[in-house]
Image (cartoon, rainbow, N blue to C red):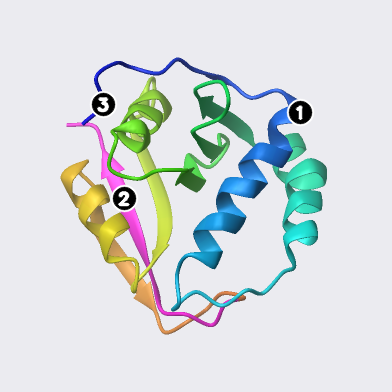
């Protein structure tokens, strides 16, 4: 549990590399997660696409975690933290929920930690696929709605 709240703020373009690095380290740390794109491709994708097409929020300086949001569809497209279990993901998710009536996101069925986290944060499963994604891994669509 964190002792203090990190500041959550809109990311600046230069932080795309830090966010991609957190994602790359997350992929490398999980034996069930295939590496579909090289580290450098992930960095380029974050620089060229994520940071231009999504609302990206970061926690801390240096970046300790980030959340990418497709604001038009109210879909969280990424939520990753450098060190899970410190409350940073919850802070980012609470920030994304501000002013929203609902949010949706996809996570992998194998990602037990994330599924427990999202259940604690009020998300429930809407549907699942057998691997309709580039990783070919079974996944679940989760939804949160303000009560």
Res 2 label: 3
Kindly indicate whether the residue at mark 1 contacts the one at mark 2 (C-beta within 8 angstroms): no
The magenta segment = 135-147
* Front label number (3 vs 1): 3
Residue at x-position 47% and y-position 46%: 80
Q: What mark, if any, has residue 70 been given in the picture? A: none
Would residue 49 appear left or right of 84 to someone viewing this image? right
Q: Left or right of 60: which side holds 14?
A: right
Tag 2 residue: 143
Question: In the image shown, does 59 or 97 lie closer to the viewer?
Answer: 59
* Element at label 2: strand
Q: Residues within 10 Å of mark 1 (few under 14, many from 20)?
A: some
Circle 3 residues within 10 Å: few <14, some 14–19, many ≥20: few
Q: Is residue 108 magenta?
A: no
Residue that badge 1 annotates? 13
**Pointer 2 local density, CA inside 10 Å: few below 14, some 14–19, many at least 20:** some
Q: Position of residue 129 (x, y in %)?
A: 41, 78
């Amino acid at each position: 549990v964190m002792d203090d709240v990190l500041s959550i703020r809109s990311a600046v373009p230069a932080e795309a590399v830090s966010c991609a690095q957190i994602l790359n380290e997350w992929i490398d740390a999980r034996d069930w997660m295939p590496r579909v794109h090289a580290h450098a491709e992930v960095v380029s994708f974050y620089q060229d696409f994520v940071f231009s097409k999504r609302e990206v929020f970061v926690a801390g300086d240096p970046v300790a975690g980030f959340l990418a949001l497709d604001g038009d569809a109210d879909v969280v497209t990424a939520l990753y933290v450098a060190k899970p279990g410190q409350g940073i993901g919850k802070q980012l998710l609470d920030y994304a929920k501000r002013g929203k009536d609902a949010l949706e996101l996809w996570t992998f069925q194998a990602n037990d930690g994330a599924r427990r986290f999202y259940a604690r944060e009020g998300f429930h499963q809407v549907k699942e696929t057998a691997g309709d994604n580039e990783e070919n891994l079974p996944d679940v669509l989760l939804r949160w709605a303000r009560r």
